[in-house]
Each structure stands twice: as C-alpha cells, then as structure tokens.
Image (cartoon, helix red, strand yellow):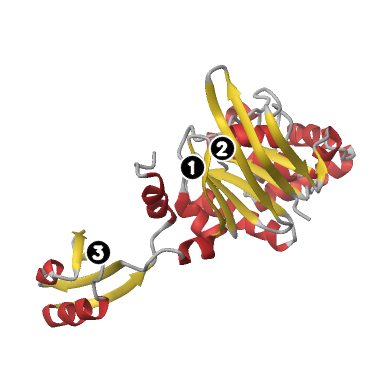
Amino acid sequence: MPVVELAAVTKAYQDKVAVNQLSFRIEPGQMFGLLGPNGSGKTSSIRMMIGITAPDSGSITLFDQPFTRSSLTRVGYLPEERGLYKKMKVLDQLIFMGSLRGLSTDEAQKRAIAWAKKLDIAHSILKKTEELSKGMQQKIQFISALIHEPELIIMDEPFSGLDPVNATLLQDTLLEQKAQGKTILFSTHRMDQVEKLCDSIALIHQGNLVLSGGVREIKSRYKRDRVIVEFSGDDSFLRSPEIAQAKNYSGHAEIQLKENGDAQKLLVEAVSKATIYRFELMEPSLEEIFIQTVGGKVDA
C-alpha cells in the first residue's frame, strides 16, 4: 500500500492554479523527491498532504486511508518557512515540540539531547534560539520534525541555506532514516541532490506533472550523449565532427555529441591530441532532462 497517494489533486488561489490534476504515489521505505523550480507548486502540494489547506478537487490518502488529523501523529514535517520561538532555549523548545507529539517530558529531553549530539549542536542546547545562526536554527527544526520517530518524514527545501558540511550531515541523517524503513518526501529545486538521494520523483512545472517514476527508469529513457573529458595539452579535439557542442573549463570539457556522434571516435581523436585523465560517457542529469521536457530554463 502507498504511504502517500495524490489522485488528480487541484488547488487554485483566486485566478492562479497552483496545482493542476496532480497524481503520484509514494511507496513505503522510499526516498521520494518532489521537484521543480521555485513557484512550481511543490509547497502547495505538501500543504495539502498534511491538511494545512484542502484540495479544490481530487483526493489525498496517507497510510492508505483518507486524510484525517489523527494520521499526522505518524508524520514529521519540516516547513520551508521555519518557525521557532526565538526567546526560548533550544532544549526547552525541543521538549515542547516532543510533548506536542505525545512524548513525556523525560523522553523528549532524552531524545533532544541525543539528537543535539548527533547533529553537533549539543554545545548550544541551553542557548536561546535567537542567539544561534540560521544553519543552527535549521538543525533545531530538523530535530523537532524527527523527535517523535515518525513513519513518514516530509521536508520542504530542507537543505536551503545550509553550508556544504551541514547539508551533507542532514543528507546522511535522512539516509539513516531511510535505512530504518522510514518513508521520506522532500521537495527541492536542486536536482543534483535528488540524483544522489532519491529512489523516485515527481517533477512538476507550473503546477503540472511533467515527469514521474523511478530515477533510474526515467534516466534510462534518454540517450547517453554527454561526455566529460579531463585533459591537458592540445584542445583541438573539441572541434571534432562528432561534437555538437563543447565547453572547456581549463582542462575540464563538457561535451554534447551530435545525433549520431561516436564517442569511441572522439576518444581516439582526443588521445592522439592530448593527455587524457578522464573520459566518461554520461546520461543526462535530471536538470538537463527537465529543461528538455519543459523547453525552458530551470530557476536557480
């Protein structure tokens, strides 16, 4: 049974359709990416999943049942707009969040301290939230979403504003949760993150579903016509008749082959002209697939 299922869900705000006939399902234990540029309808979809707003039409089920408030006890939610009590100490705040989710004070405190150590904020647990950096505050909200050990974890742009070290820490934590059998949905406009983390995706543009399915299956639909070459020496091979387009970043070349371009011929030519350190024939990235699909440019 799917943990989450949307069937022909539509939501409009006045004359703007934010989500249009959106359908997808998330199976148990999956890491699922809800993707699209800013303003595509990701947050509107998530808010309907957890009952903040109601769909104008269509249906949403959680845990194979029509949505009810009681099902939210099994859900952990990290909103895009962070909401913490600035004057409250971190530990008090996490205990309070845990108690709202049914934990005793002692159990909430135990889990809060353990999570603070795991995410490297134990030294700040007695500080007020307003004294902490944005990245530290984001970790606190991350903990509050997980403290009650939810079965379904929903995170809206969880890596936004994080430095690479802390982004990696949170990514590793989500992978650990997945290994424990949790189902995870996160939205992002950063498609490179999804390539590393997700089993399946729903990719939306202007409220419409444009791609869905397993990441591997989606990418297998597209030709391997991208080549990465790292080299030193003569770069004249980049003008090979096999190449449609090439960008050379000081010895790191990104190449798109012509319709019937032969990568092996290009490799022979490259080796004859330059010292080759890497030559890799690649499938297109999800971002490239999205651009091909919608015929436009992905927002940064």
Q: Nearer the viewer, residue 284 or 231?
A: 284
Residue 90 in percent (x, y) is at 70, 34
Give residue 42's mark: 2
The vertical placement of 96 against 267, above or below, is above
Secondary structure under badge 1?
loop
Separation of residues labelled 3 and 2 (CA atoms): 32 Å
Q: Nearer the viewer, residue 81 or 28?
A: 28
Q: Is residue 148 visible?
A: yes
Residue 298 in percent (x, y) is at 38, 42
Q: Which residue is drawn at the image coordinates 36% and 68% (left, top)?
A: 224
- Report which residue position mark 3 lands on: 255
Give residue 149's mark: none
Q: Nearer the viewer, residue 164 or 201?
A: 201
Amino acid type, residue under disc 2 in the picture = Lys
Few, some or many residues within 10 Å of mark 2 (<14, 14–19, 20+):
many
Report whether 41 appears left or right of 145.
left
